[in-house]
Amino acid sequence: MMRKTSLVLLGAASGAALTLLAVQPHMVFVGASAKAAAADTYRQLNLFGDVFERVRADYVEKPDDGKLVESAINGMLSGLDPHSSYMDAKSFRDMQVQTRGEFGGLGIEVTMEDGLIKVVAPIDDTPAAKAGVLANDIIVKLDDEAVQGLTLNQAVEKMRGPVNTKIRLTVMRKGADKPIELSITRDIIRVRSARWHVEGDDIGYIRLTQFNEQTTEGLKKGIAEIQAKVPEDKLKGYILDLRNNPGGLLDQAISVADAFLQKGEIVSTRGRNADETQRFNARPGDLTKGKPLIVLVNGGSASASEIVAGALQDHKRATILGTRSFGKGSVQTIIPLGSGNGALRLTTARYYTPSGRSIQAKGITPDIEVMQDVPDDLKNKTDTKGEASLRGHLKGDPGKEQTGSQSYVPPDPKNDKALHAADDLLRGVQVNSSSPAGTKAPVPN
């Protein structure tokens, strides 16, 4: 960083004499313009200060100064684009937990039902599972505090905590005569962002629900387990399901795409200045050994999901199947603001697929479109409006913005038309010129 700063200063210093000699009047004009702009900025800041003091002094009820400042910061950032925002200290901590994909807790998937916390399922090999928590248990107390009246988030916060600390759960269980009390010691819980199974006996299916710090390792584990279960000569290929995956960490998107590529660019990011451009390339080693690959996307596939789909599509490594993706083609940087002050989530770059296309406010168009049969009671409720419909979004290519795409995934795989189509294509039951994609020549980059 110091070297870069020195070079910039050296360049500025060496050009100063020439500027003064050759275009001194212009130099004076630029200086005056910059001073005028700075003076205008200070006037606007003074205006903000005046409004702030007037609100503090005259609002009908005494306002909280901290909330006033936080609201002002949020207003400034939300005026930039829909993805820039301010996170207070708690929101910043929650975001860190989400992106790390691990936290101190019990290992229970829960939901709210009639004001009570219902266990959807205990996660395998976690303290909750070992203590005997079962699916459909109703949690009525956490330590000595009744759960009724708490929000789901409040209850989850109480169940999380430092590793090796204890909590008592009181649960109601169908068939039990009285409440059951369980003492559980918190441990590190890792959020599974990758799940997998074998379709039939010849296709590897991998679903990624988000891109956190655990995602690539989960993907690698899934591929290894599928290869251990299915002989190579019997394995028809893989399905990578990115439907309704909202994205996550850029480095995880790069490493997931890299798992299927031998070489070539995966993505480039371009900031305001040309010297901020970054290119990320694949390293040798396709973990699937060139087996055909189909990627499922829909209107809920966004950001990091689109980076993966775009890279594999441009390199003709995979067939993209489903409906058009969300269209979020920007990168946000998390900028911590010091202890207790939270952080900024600031849009700092746009990203481009290997062929140089931006999908901002447009999305990834699938090679094969497959629409789901949506139940009548859910029609008009399952389409995602997409990036282009968000107020204040960064503009995409003129005349190419697109909004709205189906995001419905049937809860029963038997009714999943996209999944069936992918299975049929990999098995050769159906034939399409766009599939199945194997190892082909990468695009120039």
Image (spheres, rainbow, N blue to C red):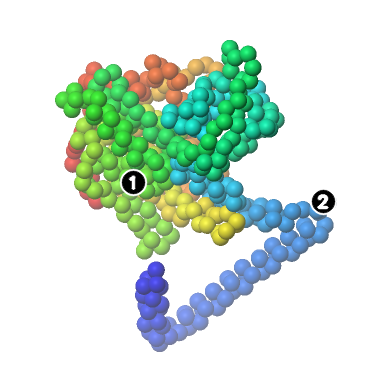
Task: Classify 10 Å Cα crowding around label 1: few (below 14), some (14-19), many (20 and above).
Answer: many
Compared to 440, does 10 lie above or below?
Answer: below
Q: Quadrant of residue 213?
A: top left
Task: Classify 10 Å Cα crowding around label 2: few (below 14), some (14-19), many (20 and above).
Answer: few
- Across and down, in percent, residue 443 comes to 23, 45
Say whether disc 1 or disc 2 marks the residue closer to the N-terminus.
2
Q: Nearer the viewer, residue 256 or 398?
A: 256
Kindly report the distance in space between the C-alpha atoms of the residues bearing marks 1 and 2.
Answer: 51 Å
Q: Nearer the viewer, residue 283 or 330?
A: 283
- Across and down, in percent, residue 55 comes to 77, 57
- Across and down, in percent, residue 185 comes to 53, 36
Q: Which residue is mark 2?
A: 61
Q: Please, what is the three-letter code of the amino acid marked with disc 2?
A: Glu
Please tell me how many numbered marks the rendered image carries: 2
Compared to 407, does 402 lie above or below?
Answer: below
Labels 1 and 2 touching (C-beta < 8 A): no
Extreme left residue here? 233
As helix, strand or loop, the secondary structure at mark 1 comes to helix
Seen at 26% across and 33% down, the residue is 224
In the rendered structure, find residue 322 and report the number of the disc placed on it: none
